[in-house]
Amino acid sequence: MESKKPEASTPRRFLRGRSLSKRVHLAAKRQTKTIGLPPGSLVYVGKEDAEKGKIGLTVFDEKKCIEKDLLQMEDLVAAKEEGGFVWVAVEGLQQVKAVEELGQRFGIHPLILEDILNTSQRPKTEEFEDYLFIVLKLIDYNASTDEILVEQVSLIIGPDFLLTFQEKHCSFLDRVHERLRTGKGRIRRLGVDHLAYCLIDSIVDNYFVALEKLAEKIELLEEEVVSNPNREILQVIHRMKTDMIFLRKSIWPLREVVNRLVISESAFIKEDVKPYLRDVYDHAVHIIDTLETYRDIVSGMLEIYLSSINHKLNEVMKLLTVISTIFMPLTFFTSWYGMNFKHMPELDEAWGYPLIGMLSLFVAVLMLFYFRRKEWI
């Protein structure tokens, strides 16, 4: 089946929305809100238009799974009394007061809560005596705006609880909720560390979806660079190049985070979960290698663009040179017989004018034939 040739206006769809690099510049500006505040001050640093969100509470073990919205913190006491494992999922980090109360209930250090509310954090993992803290970058593709979005997800793994903090609701994480709800696999039996693995695995797997969309863009852009290089193409290449750099900064630490979980001796990561984490580590390495390949391709597109522009310029210069060369003898004829000296013998010839016209045409055709034979044109 033949691939459909992209339309000439294909790059315009890549110019929609805001680039990742511009969004990170805005995040850096919002970071100034924390300047001068004491360590551990809880200030939301993120998108102003972020979702208000909700807090979900799930209590589960091998036999049961109870899901409900956490409307008041006193419900946590009743949830713990029911036994089993507790998963609190916070969607929407503008709920600063709720995040602070959760930190107090579960004994989370204020500096960790500050990192959770600061959505410009680098992916990392930190081990504490009572819990394990993980920060990851969630990469998602928005089909309506044709954008690749980067959000922050924080996880706190305790002995019998898991706290997750997201900037907004992520539909692909619903698959984990469904597995927990139906009890498929080992997700209920192996506890909160296995649940955390399932969430991390879903986040990493969604990287492949985003990279697939990115590959489609690169493929279309490659054809446009060769067939129709223009100023708009150069803007698209520059935008994709800066986006690649930002994606690399978001994805590269992922390998280190997962590797630290694999080699960790923390009591919150049991040995039977580590083989699954090693599989996630392999996926992370594959994602990084793929991203590096795409980055090299986009960097090479700039060279292809410059080569195409130079080739176009050379073709234009060659055409102008041929035209100038053909008109050189014609200019000589017209200037020679335009002198109008009184005793020029050719001026009195009846066939002088048509003869010069035929001679000029003959010389022009002869030169074109010669250029064609030499394959100069």
Image (cartoon, rainbow, N blue to C red):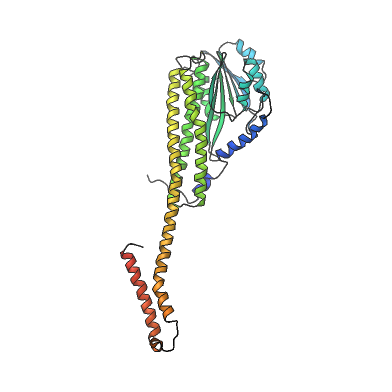
Seen in the picture, residue 193 relative to 293 is either above or below; the reply is above
Seen in the picture, residue 36 relative to 338 is either above or below; the reply is above
The x and y percentages for residue 58 are 58, 18
Give the residue at x 39% y 85%: 352
The x and y percentages for residue 211 are 47, 35
Give the residue at x 52% y 33%: 140
Along the viewing direction, whichever of 75 and 265 lies nearer the viewer: 265
Is residue 49 something that shows in the picture? no
The x and y percentages for residue 270 are 48, 14
Is residue 299 something that shows in the picture? yes
Q: Is residue 174 left or right of residue 354?
A: right
Q: Quadrant of residue 112?
A: top right
Q: Is residue 98 left or right of residue 331?
A: right
Q: Is residue 292 left or right of residue 89?
A: left
Q: Tell me how many marks there are.
A: 0
In the picture as drawn, the residue positioned furthest to the left comes out as 373
Seen in the picture, residue 350 relative to 286 is either above or below; the reply is below
The x and y percentages for residue 243 are 52, 39
Seen in the picture, residue 100 relative to 367 is either above or below; the reply is above
Quarter of the picture holding the C terminus = bottom left
Quarter of the picture holding the N terminus = top left
Q: Quadrant of residue 171?
A: top right
